[in-house]
Amino acid sequence: RKIRNEYGKELPIIATGGPTEESILKTIEAGANSITYTPPSSAEIFAGVMDKYRHNQANN
């Protein structure tokens, strides 16, 4: 909001919205014109892969 208030609507703002829908909406409300999404970390992705692997191993 500070940047938007200081420079007005003429300055395009590209911002990182964060990993959640709530944080992205707050960034848009603050005046961002474009949002980049923060993807899940490698650890979060790997945890999901391992959960699926463990589930499949338990069912075999």
Image (cartoon, helix red, strand yellow):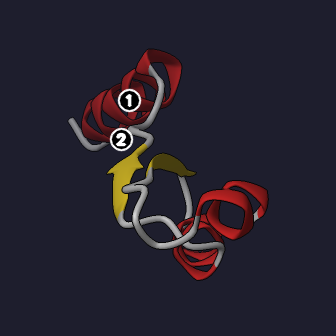
Quarter of image, res 6: bottom right
In-image side of 56 versus 40 (left or right): left
State the SS at label 1.
helix
Q: 46 or 28, which is in the foreground? A: 28
Q: Residue 55, which numbered label?
A: 2
Toward which corner of the image does residue 7 lie, by quadrant?
Answer: bottom right
Q: Amino acid at mark 1?
A: Ile
Q: Secondary structure at mark 2?
A: helix
Identity of the amino acid at label 2? Answer: His
Residue at image point 44% right, 36% down = 40
Residue 30: % across, % down: 65, 73
Identify the residue at image location x=56%, y=62%.
20
**Residue 58: quadrant of the picture:** top left
Identify the disc placed on residue 23: none
Of label 1 and label 2, which has the lower sequence position? Answer: 1
Q: Closer to the camera, 11 or 30?
A: 11
Q: Which residue position is annotated with label 1?
A: 45
**Residue at image point 38% right, 29% down:** 45
Q: Nearer the viewer, mark 1 or mark 2?
A: 1
Look at the picture and state if 21 lies above or below 18: below
- Dot 2 surroundings within 10 Å: few (below 14), some, or many (20 or more)? few
45 w.r.t. 52: above or below: above
